[in-house]
Amino acid sequence: MSNEQGPVKWENPVRASLKEGKPVVGITITAASTEVAAQAAALGFDFLWIEMEHSPITLETTRQIVLATRGLMAIPFVRVPVNEFWTAKRVLDSGALGVVFPFVSTEVAAQRAVQACKYPPLGRRGSGPGLAIFRWGGTESYHDFADRNVMVIVNIEEREAIENIEAIAATPGVDVLFVGTSDLSFSMGLRGRHDHPEVAKAVDKVVEAARRHGKFAGAPAASASQARQYIDRGVLFIQSLTELRFMAEGARQFLEPLGKSATRAKTQSFY
């Protein structure tokens, strides 16, 4: 497609929707299955949240999942285990179009995340995009394409991050401030009580900072009603359940009307 100014450049549809004020919803991928990920990418979600921090998914599996999204709706994002250049570089060179960085609690950590995702002079990403080009090849230079379309999502999940939220939100190149409500609750001494009023106040503080600095706020939602509540509060980037949780919910909806009990398999106690 082209116009009088030249070819129309492709834009990451997740970012495009956010810029239009529309919420985006992703499904969390934790199973090392290309087939499951491909099915998930075709269900209507805006993005795949490929989980490398809290699951056994490897870099090789991530690559296969990224390739499996070709021609499907969902854009592949990856949460890396740590905020380091090499972790971001490897998933980006595998074709991820967004990186979720855990425990970004300072301005320096936010800057490191951006630098890992941008080529010089905007950042310090190393150039070796052969595999990524195979997934995202187009009419323009991949380097320019990536600098425009790779999204930088930073996890706000410590009390320190809330204290530094203005500086983090002001960091050029950060796209989404994602509140990890469970880890944040632990950091606040609330031991997983992510629905506590203090956590809610922290979420609102992140939303306000995001608005002031032209960024977007994100959070995890365990249900459509919780997602709607977040959206009404200005949170537009929603991480939904894992594929395994959706499978369990589907089983429950089928079995309970038949008088069956859908329960988790029992495991040996540690006590």
Image (cartoon, rainbow, N blue to C red):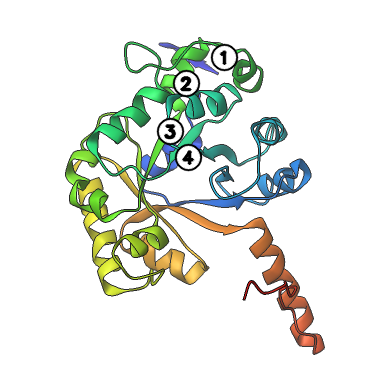
Labelled pair 3, 4 in contact (Cβ < 8 Å): yes
Residue at left 72%, top 45%?
32
- The label nearer to you, 3 versus 1, is 1
Q: Which residue is mark 1?
A: 129
For badge 4, the amino acid type reads Val
Q: What secondary structure is marked by label 4?
A: helix
Residue 34's image quarter?
top right
Q: Position of residue 159 (x, y in %)?
A: 26, 56
Q: How many angstroms separate mark 1 from mark 4 (CA)?
A: 22 Å
Quarter of the picture containing the C terminus is: bottom right
Q: Which residue is mark 3?
A: 151
Which disc, if any, is residue 255? none
Q: What secondary structure is marked by label 2?
A: helix
Q: Position of residue 30 (x, y in %)?
A: 64, 50
- The label nearer to you, 1 versus 4, is 1
Which disc, if any, is residue 14? 4
Labelled pair 1, 4 in contact (Cβ < 8 Å): no
Q: Which residue is mark 2?
A: 146
Residue at left 67%, top 30%?
63
Q: Can the viewer see residue 8 in this picture?
A: no
For badge 1, the amino acid type reads Pro
